[in-house]
Image (cartoon, rainbow, N blue to C red):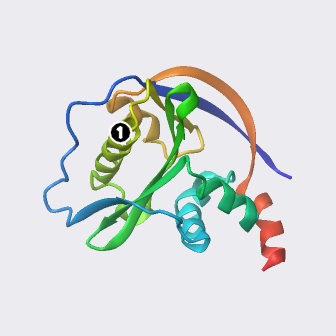
Amino acid sequence: MRLLRTRVTSLEIMSRPRSLVPVPEGAGTVAVFEMRKMALSEYRALYRKVGQAHHWTSRLMSDERLAREIHNRDTRIFIMTVDGHRAGWFELDVRRAVQEVRIVHFGLLPEFRGRGLAHVMLSRAIFGAFSTDPKRVTIETNTLDHPAALALYQKHGFRPYALRDVQTPAIETMLEPLRALS
């Protein structure tokens, strides 16, 4: 198994911003909505389309495990569409016991990047996370993620609180066992 070294930055925001980021002029009709009990195939398609270039592997798992993760009562998945086409998604993990919401995944499909839509979607993710009245909202990024991710999070008020170096499997080493099953 090929391992990649990456630096993970953990960030937090302690209060909800005053207003939502407006949709850029000419961006089309943008909608963000919660998707309950998302079909595993739909989830995997979004996850791979966004995450494959960045070696996302945490959700490459069996149907049973994935369903347990994403259909959990404390997991909320939101889809962003532009003119009726899926443009991205974010996933919230509501940790009621510690009054924290974690933005677990945040991904904009490649064909929608560079239009200011990541700001729109992150703004909605932050507002959605604060809707449960947590003390803080957290998110992580690493050096394998999109190069603009860390700056985007910081521009929206997230502040780093921890750094750690980790090794993560390269995406191709995780996909081989899955290909054998199909």
Secondary structure of the residue carrying numbered label 1 = loop
Is residue 110 shown above or below 41?
Answer: above
Q: Nearer the viewer, residue 61 or 118?
A: 61
Q: Which residue in the structure is indicated by mark 1?
A: 131
Horizontal and vertical percent for residue 24? 18, 53
Left or right of 56 in this view: 155:
left
Left or right of 140 in this view: 136:
left
Q: Which residue appears at 82% of the width and 76% of the height?
A: 181
Residue 107 visible to an observer of this rendering: no
Horizontal and vertical percent for residue 163? 61, 23
Residue 152, by quadrant, is top left
Give the residue type at disc 1.
Answer: Ser
Count of marks placed on residues: 1
Horizontal and vertical percent for residue 175? 75, 65
Residue 129 visible to an observer of this rendering: yes
Q: Which residue appears at 78% of the width and 80% of the height?
A: 182
